[in-house]
Amino acid sequence: MEQLHLEGILSTLVYSAIGILVFLVVLGLIEMATKYSINKKIAQEGNVALAIVLGSMIIALGMIISSAIH
């Protein structure tokens, strides 16, 4: 079996934490910049377009984290 590489695991956790933190900051900035609540628009009013935009942000962030780890 392969030996566990603690440096790789640690760097993965650090990059993931940084990515999630950046996502939350950007989401907060978007909430402040718009006149409406993103959660209310998606969950209660069913705004599919906004959900797609938010989903694409999550996918893009995942791609950035993935490339930073590799």
Image: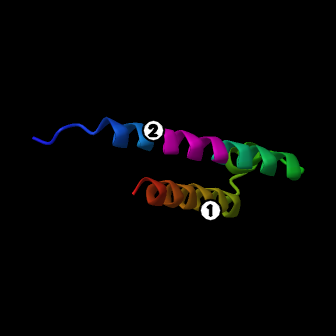
- Identify the residue at horizontal 58%, vertical 43% (top origin): 18
- Secondary structure of residue under mark 1: helix
Badge number at residue 13? 2
Front residue (pair 17, 7): 7
Residue 17, magenta (yes or no): yes
Relative side of 34 to 68, left or right: right
Badge number at residue 52? 1
Residue 21: x %, y % from top left: 63, 41
Tell me how far mark 1 sits from mark 2, CA to CA: 27 Å
- Identify the residue at horizontal 62%, vertical 62% (top origin): 52
Front residue (pair 47, 35): 35
Residue type, numbered disc 1: Ile
The magenta stretch is 13-22
- Identify the residue at horizontal 62%, vertical 58% (top origin): 57
Q: Is residue 47 above or below residue 43?
A: below
- Identify the residue at horizontal 85%, vertical 48% (top origin): 36
Residue type, numbered disc 2: Leu
Q: How many marks?
A: 2
Query: What is the magenta segment's predominant secondary structure?
Result: helix
